[in-house]
Image: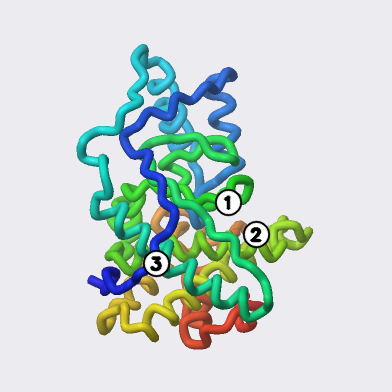
Amino acid sequence: MARWDEIVSTGDVEDRRGVSSGLLLGGGGGLVALLLTLGLNYMGLNVSQSTVESAIGTVQTMRAGQAKQTTQPEQFRGNDSYEVFTRKVLGSTNDVWSGLFSQNNSTYKKPRLVLFRQATQSGCGIATTDMGPHFCPQDQTIYLDETFFDELRTRFGADTGDVAQAYVIAHEVGHNVQSQLGVFNTKASKTRSGSIDVELQADCYAGIWAYSQAKNGIFENGEIDQAISAASAVGDDHIQKVEGVQINPETWTHGSSTERVNAFKKGYTSGQPSQCTNLQ
């Protein structure tokens, strides 16, 4: 276990776990399917028809409930251990990027993080468990259902220890950095190759965060291997192999396992944002 208690800063985390989203979708399941398909998911896990149908069923069940739950269940009240963990991780990313932005006479806009279960409303529409952890630039917020890591471990074989989960958060924070730098406004970012560049750069940015934590003695010996395992597990080629489909680089949008690991390591060994380019 990394020394998270030694991190003084805390991030802005909202805990919505166990609270009904009260989604008012009006168009039914078709709208949900469209949003899920457009949103895709966290790091390239393809949204299958069964996944979409499962998410539709979840949301429709929530809508059908006559009594909406507005009080959070007891186990999620207060600052439980996972909420404390995410606050520490997000706080540490704030420290890293605030410092780097200030070196260029800029101000870093700190993101929020929302913990939820099943589905919740976001500035980008609907955040669901099936989409995985993701960043919404419209409200500058990361959405995370930590049960995602169960699937990442059991289905894709990733190490999902605390440092691996922190890497995922740091990757999404990387998208917040990109948003502030205008990366999402470029035409190149909207192409398949550009999408890979964006994701690999976010991996590299996560590596920069890890570089800082290692330098500050937050990680125990060997714990960085958790992050490397997670980065490898979400490579497009590994995902296609696990899903039993033909490995086809022409369909990739997030990069291969090797590319993702190398991008993370480049940030981790350099600690410099200037190194997070030309990663394909």
- Is residue 134 shown above or below 67? below
Q: Is residue 253 visible?
A: yes
State the residue lying farthest toward the right: 187
Q: CA distance from mark 1 to mark 2?
A: 9 Å
Label 2's element? helix
Q: Quadrant of the N terminus?
A: bottom left
For mark 2, what is the residue?
179
Quarter of the figure with residue 201: bottom right
Q: Residue at x 44, y 21 (%)?
A: 60
Label 1's element? loop
Three-letter amino acid code of the residue under disc 2: Ser
- Is residue 173 shown above or below 33? below
Q: Residue at x 36, y 83 (%)?
A: 216
Instruction: State which mark lies toward you, 2 or 3.
Output: 3
Residue 77 on image: x %, y %: 26, 40
Left or right, 186 with reference to 137: right
Q: Quadrant of the C terminus?
A: bottom right
Asked whether the beta carbons under mark 1 and mark 2 sit within 8 Å of each other, the answer is yes
For mark 3, what is the residue?
9
Quick one: label 3, few (<14), some, or many (20+) residues within 10 Å?
some
| Label disc, if present, on residue 140 of the rendered structure | 1
Instruction: State which mark lies toward you, 3 or 1.
Output: 3
N-terminal label among 2 and 3: 3
